[in-house]
Amino acid sequence: MHTRGTATRHNEPERVFQGRSSRIYDRLTGLLLRGVYRRIAEDIADAAPDGAAVLDVGTGPGRLLAEIARRRTDLQLTGVDLSPDMITLAERNLRPYGARVSARTGDVTDLPFPDASFELIVSSFSLHHWTEPESAVPELARVLTPGGRLYLYDLRFAPFTNVVTAARERSLLTGRPHRSTLIRTGSPLLPSCVRHVMSNPAR
Ligand SMILES: C[S@@+](CC[C@H](N)C(=O)[O-])C[C@H]1O[C@@H](n2cnc3c(N)ncnc32)[C@H](O)[C@@H]1O
């Protein structure tokens, strides 16, 4: 999961998320990290309002979206990822859930959605791969509805501080006070991760 240090051109997926590597990532995470996705999906299933539109940024092969879809059949779920190969895998993994779940290619710094499209945005283990986390902030705030919430999950070293600082400097995501929590996943491979929750102000 961790490929920090890999040289990446902006707007180009890292090699580890393309071709054969993306298929290996899909198989390994499907086998080894199911408990982690379940733990995060429980959070999102509890937090999402009735009938909400939910976006998963850096969805990879869509494993988290599948777990959310199983728990909440009322939600409209969308995944977005820089890697077209990951999106191909996500489309395959999400097929059983029909039209209420979809995935498309896109960059967190230039999201292919209109303003105020989603009541909740989640992202798991993607933030530490974003080449410009600061540039993601205005886009995340733009596609969230007023009062919409952002749930970022990642490893402890992920650049959460860059996101929080960029939001503060631009007076974005100034809704409820920002919360950071250590989450126990119950998974031996990845026993804990950090959750940051931020939100847009209500209108
Ligand atoms: C470690 S994987 C995590 C995938 C999935 N969320 C999970 O938990 O298994 C990181 C994902 O973030 C995607 N990604 C990296 N930079 C991105 C960006 N700027 N915009 C959208 N997705 C990005 C990668 O293509 C990759 O699929």
Image (cartoon, helix red, strand yellow):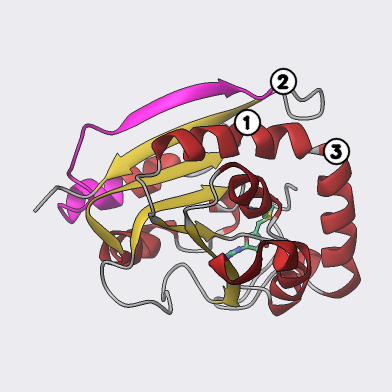
Q: In the image shown, does 69 or 141 lie closer to the viewer?
A: 69
Which callout, 1 or 2, points at the residue further toward the start of the chain? 1
Q: Is residue 36 left or right of residue 145?
A: right
To which quarter of the image does residue 156 belong?
top right
Residue 80 in sight here:
no
Amino acid type of disc 3? Leu
Amino acid type of disc 2? Gly
What residue is rendered at 32% in x and 68% in y? 117
Residue 202 in sight here:
yes
Marks 1 & 2, CB-CB < 8 Å contact: yes
Q: In the image shown, does 106 or 92 lie closer to the viewer?
A: 92
Instruction: Locate the C terminus by quadrant.
Output: bottom left
Mark 3 residue crowding within 10 angstroms, few (<14) / some (14–19) / many (20+): few
Which quadrant of the picture is home to ligand 1?
bottom right
Residue 31: say if magenta.
no
Which callout, 3 or 1, points at the residue further toward the start of the chain? 3
Q: Which residues are magenta?
A: 165-185
* Residue 89 to residue 71: above or below: below
Q: In the image shown, does 180 or 102 lie closer to the viewer?
A: 102
The percent coordinates of residue 154 (x first, y second) are: 57, 40
SS class, disc 1 = helix
